[in-house]
Image (cartoon, helix red, strand yellow):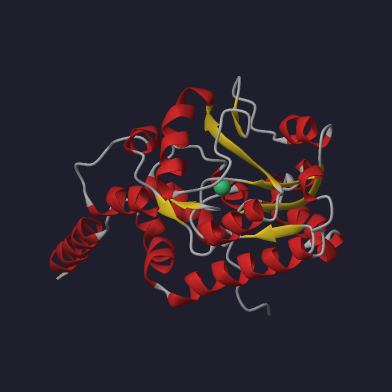
Amino acid sequence: MKRILFFIILFTVVLLNSLRIKEERYLTSVLWQQTSAEYRALCYQAYNIAALRILEHKTNSNEKAIVVDIDETIIDNSPYRAERIKNDEFNESFWDWVKLENAEAVPGALDFLIKAHSLGFKIFYITNRDEKYKKYTENNLKKLGFPQVSKDHLFMRQNKISDKSARRNSISKKYEIILLIGDNLVDFSQVFYGDSIQDRKEITDKYKDDFGTKFIVIPNPNHGRWKKMFYHRNEKISDDEKRNRMIEKLKGIEE
Ligand SMILES: [Mg+2]
């Protein structure tokens, strides 16, 4: 009897493992981004608020700047992540996807930036895509019709420095930055970097009045600084280990 039970358990474990899909931890979040009307509505909401904000700064607009992040702020890279989930054979890197120059615009982003451009504001794109992918990024943005896409307005990551402060500061020397738009709070200020989940929440509470006024947040359920709190993007650990570390962070009903 014990033998039979052992084989039933073994069979179930093997079956469950074979059913598990690659990068399953992204399944719900990518689906939400790609299929939910709510994701689109949140993006529109964010860009509608951004449009209201810039109207308050219309005078001398050519001395004022709007700073936007790129990935998951104005363009959508979810097809890359979706392909990794769907296709077991697909092992290309994010940079291979970047080279395709095929990302589509995030809902509302294009209309907003065209409007800002027509009102005379300076637009600067600050991204942590590496400098060597500048041309591909520029081509993708131009293909979609984003305004002011030129080498002086596109700040890539150099020397692997992800902190965007120096790039923001170089813009501040010439222009007043009136609005920052991003999907990761460090797109606004390095103060949001934080070393723990609690730390990040407390800093965010401290700056709560700036959201919707100076900082416009675009939803990104797939990746960002928030996810580094789980496994610090240590890609060397197994999918199961990543899953376990995420489950550890769940807050259940307290006794
Ligand atoms: Mg981003």
Residue 46 position, x and y percent, is 63, 67
Residue 137 position, x and y percent, is 46, 35
For the image, the number of numbered tags is 0
Quarter of the C terminus within the rendering? bottom right
> What residue do we see at 23% from left, 41% from top?
90
Residue 209 position, x and y percent, is 84, 65
Q: Is residue 164 visible?
A: yes
> What residue do we see at 54% from left, 61% from top?
111
Left or right for 209, reference 45: right
Residue 140 sits in quarter: top left
Vertical comparison of 175 with 1: above or below: above
Quarter of the N terminus within the rendering? bottom left
> What residue do we see at 39% from left, 33% from top?
95
> What residue do we see at 69% from left, 51% from top?
185
Residue found at the far top of this picture: 159
Residue 190 sits in quarter: top right
Residue 13 position, x and y percent, is 24, 60
Left or right for 221, reference 99: right
Q: Is residue 236 visible?
A: no
Vertical comparison of 5 with 128: above or below: below
Which sits in the foreground, 35 or 147?
147
Which sits in the foreground, 158 or 19?
158
